Amino acid sequence: MERPVVRVGVIGGGFVGTALVQLLLDPTRHAAIVDGATAPLELVGVAVRDTSKPHPGIEAALLTSDVDGLLSNDLDVLVEVAGGIEPVRTYLETALKLGVSVVTANKALIAESGTELAQLAHDNGADLFYEAAVGGAIPILRALRSSLAGERINRVMGIVNGTTNYILTKMTSGGSDYASALAEAQALGYAEADPSADVEGFDVAAKVQILSTLAFGTRLSGDEVAREGITGIRAVDVEYALRSGYVIKMLGVAERVGETGVSRRAHPAMVPARHPLASVNGPMNAVFVEGVKSGPLMWLGQGAGGEPTATAVLGDVLDAARNRVSGRHDVPFSGDTSLHYVPAGELSSVFYLSIDVLDRPGVLSDVAGIFGRHDVSIRSMDQSGFGDEARLSFLTHRALSSDVFATVEELKASASVESVGACIRVIDGVFE
Amino acid sequence: MERPVVRVGVIGGGFVGTALVQLLLDPTRHAAIVDGATAPLELVGVAVRDTSKPHPGIEAALLTSDVDGLLSNDLDVLVEVAGGIEPVRTYLETALKLGVSVVTANKALIAESGTELAQLAHDNGADLFYEAAVGGAIPILRALRSSLAGERINRVMGIVNGTTNYILTKMTSGGSDYASALAEAQALGYAEADPSADVEGFDVAAKVQILSTLAFGTRLSGDEVAREGITGIRAVDVEYALRSGYVIKMLGVAERVGETGVSRRAHPAMVPARHPLASVNGPMNAVFVEGVKSGPLMWLGQGAGGEPTATAVLGDVLDAARNRVSGRHDVPFSGDTSLHYVPAGELSSVFYLSIDVLDRPGVLSDVAGIFGRHDVSIRSMDQSGFGDEARLSFLTHRALSSDVFATVEELKASASVESVGACIRVIDGVFE
C-alpha cells in the first residue's frame, strides 16, 4: 500500500529538540519507527532563536529562525519543545488552525491553555498530544487516556519533579540540610539558579492539573491547585520522618472527594517507607494511580533529560502520524466532567509539625492548648534540643486541614513559640 | 453525530468474565466508558459451559452455552476469558474470519498461536488485543506497542507470576520453607492444587514470549524460552540472598544479545535489594523495561484477580470499539524482526550455587577443582552446618552459563557432594 510522507517540524533546539532530531534521523531506528500503520516521517526543519549559534547534533540545513515559514511549509505534525508561554502559544494556535497536529512537552502552557488548545485541535481535525509534559519518559498520560479509560480512578499521586526529589533524597540519604542539597542540585544542573518554580511547587501544580484532567475528565486549564513548597523542610524533619518509618517526598495529588468533588494539591508529605513511592529516588519520577477495580498501579521512570523526554515526544509524534495516515484524530479528553474544586483546608489528614520553642516551663502546656482550641488532637509529641535549639515535634490524629492551618497561625503568634518549622501531611497506610 | 452500537460478546463466566460484565453494565461508568470516540457498548451474551449452574453477578438472560450462536449474532467484539487452548482457539478463529475483533486474556493461547491469530485478524480487518495476558491490570503491552514504538529496547524483565512471587515473598519475609509457603499459597487460592504451571515457570515463559514480541517485534508464537522453576529454592538460599543484599525473585527476561540475537528466559534470580523490582511483593506484578534513550522504566500493579484483570480487558474492548467506530484496525505487531534465539547457555552471568556436601577433609578442594575444570571462577565461598547438614554456598565471578551448568552436572556426580541445591543467576548492579 502506498502511503504519503508525514512532514514533521520542530520548534526548539535544546536538549530535547536535539535528542528528538537524532531519533528521527537515526537510520537504524527507521524500521521500528515506521511500522505498517505509519508513513515515513520527514523532518522538515527545526526552528531556533538564533541560527548562527552552534547547535551540535542538528544539521545546519535544518535550522531556521522563521517559525511562520516552517508552519506554512505543509506540515502534518508540529513538535514544540521550546518552552514558555508566548510566543509559543501563538505558534501552536496558528498550527492548529491550519489543521497541523501539535505535540508539546510544555506543561506550563498546557496547564494554562490546554482546554482551549484541545478544542482548537478538535475543531480543525488535528491532534494535541503532550505526553512529555508530565513524568518525562513515563508514558502515564496515554495510559490514563486509553488503557484506563473505562476505570474509575480515585486518586493519582506522583513524584513528578526531579529537582525537589533530588534535594529531598540528598537530605534523606546524605543528611544534608536544605540549603546545601539545593546548592548541590544547582551545581549538577538539576536545579535552576532561581529554583522557585521547582521548590515552591509551581511545576508540580501544573502537572497535577494535567493529571487531574486525564484521571477525572476535568478542565485542562486554569483550574486551582493548592500549593506548598519544600523550602521550610529541615534536616531535623527528615530525621524525624526516618525514625518514624517515613520518607519526605514532594507530591502532586489529584483525588476525588465524594461523588462531586476533586482536590488538587502540590505539597511535601511523609510517605510510609514501604510505600512504592518511598523508594523513588534522585531524579526519578513515579506516578501512583488508585483505581476502584484495577487496584494500585505505579509507573516509574526518568522524569527529565533530553533523551528520555524525547522518547515520550516521539511516541506522540508516531500516534499523530498514525492518525494522519488513517485520516482521523483523537477526541480531546478534557472538560466533560464538572467536579467542584475542594479547597485543601476542607480535607482531613494526619499532620507532622515541628516547632522551635522557648526552653522554659509552661511552654508545652501553652502549645498543647493552642492545638486543643482548634480541635486538633495530638497523637505523639517529641521534645528535643535545649536552650535556643529547643524543639517540639508533633504528630496529630487525623484533623481538618483548615484547623491545622489555624493552629499554625496561632502558634506563630504565641509568645512561647520562636518559629513554626515544617507542617507536613502524613500519608497513613501504604495505599491510603 | 449518530453512532452505531458496538455489540460485545463474552466467552467465560468466571471471576474475570463476571467482573467485566459488571463493569460493562454499571450505569455510573457509562459516561466514562463511552466517550466521544466510542459508540455505546451493548453486551449481547455471555457463553458459559453450563447455564444451569449459578453465575452470581451475571443476569440469567445473558447466559448461553451456544458459542456458535453468540458468534453469529452480529458481534463487533468478542471477549475471551475462559482459558485453555481448545475449543477456544477454534472459536477465536471463527470470530476473526467473520471480521469480529477479539480481546483475550489467554496467555497460553497467544504464546502458542498468537502470530497466526494476529495475521487472521489483519486479513479480516479486525483487531486482536491481549493486554490482560501479561501483568493483569498493568497496561504494559499497549505501552510497548504505542508509547515506546519508536524506542530501542534492550531488555524487559518482569515479575509476572503472582503465585511464585507470593511464595518467594513468604520465604523472604516470613522465613518459610518452600513447601509450607506453597501450601499457604494453595490455601489462599494463590496457587493451584497442581502448581506446576506456575512453579516450573511455564506461565512466566508464555508471558516472556509475548513481551519479547512487543519489545523486539519477534514472532508471537511458538518460540523458544529457556525455563527454570523455583521448586529447588530453600530457606537457606533466601537467607543467603538477604545477608548478601539481594532478594530472590522469579523473573521473566527478554533481552537483546548483540545486534541480531535475543534471549528469552524464565528463571529465579537474585535481585539487588535496592533494585525497583526487589520491593515488588506478594501478588503484585511489575515489568521493568530498559530502553536505550528512555532509560529504565517500570510498571507496577495487580497481576491477577477478577476485577484488576477485567479493567485491562475493558481497556482493550474500548480500543477495539474506537477502531470499529472509525472503521480501522491496528496493524499487528509481530513477526517482522528476525532475531535469532540465543540459548541460555551462551550467556554469561554471576551465579549462586548451594551444595550439600559430606563433612570431611578434602571436600572443598574436590569441589573447587570441579569449578576450575569448567573455567568457573569463584568470587566467594561460605561454609555452614556440620555432619549431614554441611553445606557450601558459592558466588561465582561472571561465567558462561553453559560452563556453570556443566559444573553442576559434574558436582552432582561427585562422591564429595550429597546434592546440588539451588543454582541461581545474580543480577549485578541496579540497572544491569
Image (tube, coloured by chain):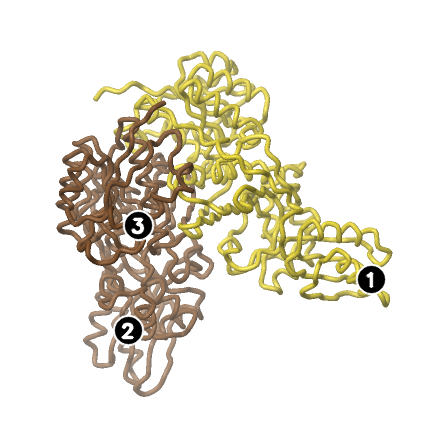
Chain colours: A yellow, B brown
Looking at the picture, tell me which residue is in the foreground, B407 or A258: A258
Question: Amino acid under label 2?
Answer: Gly
- Circle 2 is placed at which residue position? B421
Q: Chain of mark 1?
A: A
Question: Amino acid under label 1?
Answer: Asp
Q: Position of residue A231 (x, y in %)?
A: 69, 46
Disc number lying in front (1 or 3):
1
Reply above or below: A15 against B404: above
Q: Is residue A176 left or right of residue B283?
A: right
Q: Is residue B317 left or right of residue A126?
A: left
Disc number lying in front (1 or 2):
1
Reply above or below: A15 against A372: above
Residue A352 visible from this viewpoint? yes
Q: Earlier in the sequence, mark 2 or mark 3?
A: 3
Q: Position of residue B260 (x, y in %)?
A: 24, 42
Looking at the picture, tell me which residue is in the foreground, A247 or A188: A247
Question: Amino acid under label 3?
Answer: Val
Determine which of the numbered discs, if any, sits on residue B35 in the image: none
- Circle 3 is placed at which residue position? B134
Q: Is residue A229 left or right of residue A29?
A: right
Badge 3 crowding class, 10 Å Cα cut-off, few under 14, some 14 to 19, many 20 or more, is many
Q: Position of residue B214 (x, y in %)?
A: 29, 42
Disc number lying in front (2 or 3):
3
- Circle 1 is placed at which residue position? A366
Please give the name of the residue rendered at 50% of the width and 35% of the height, measured from the top-left corner.
A337
Q: Chain of mark 3?
A: B
Discs 1 and 3 share one subunit: no
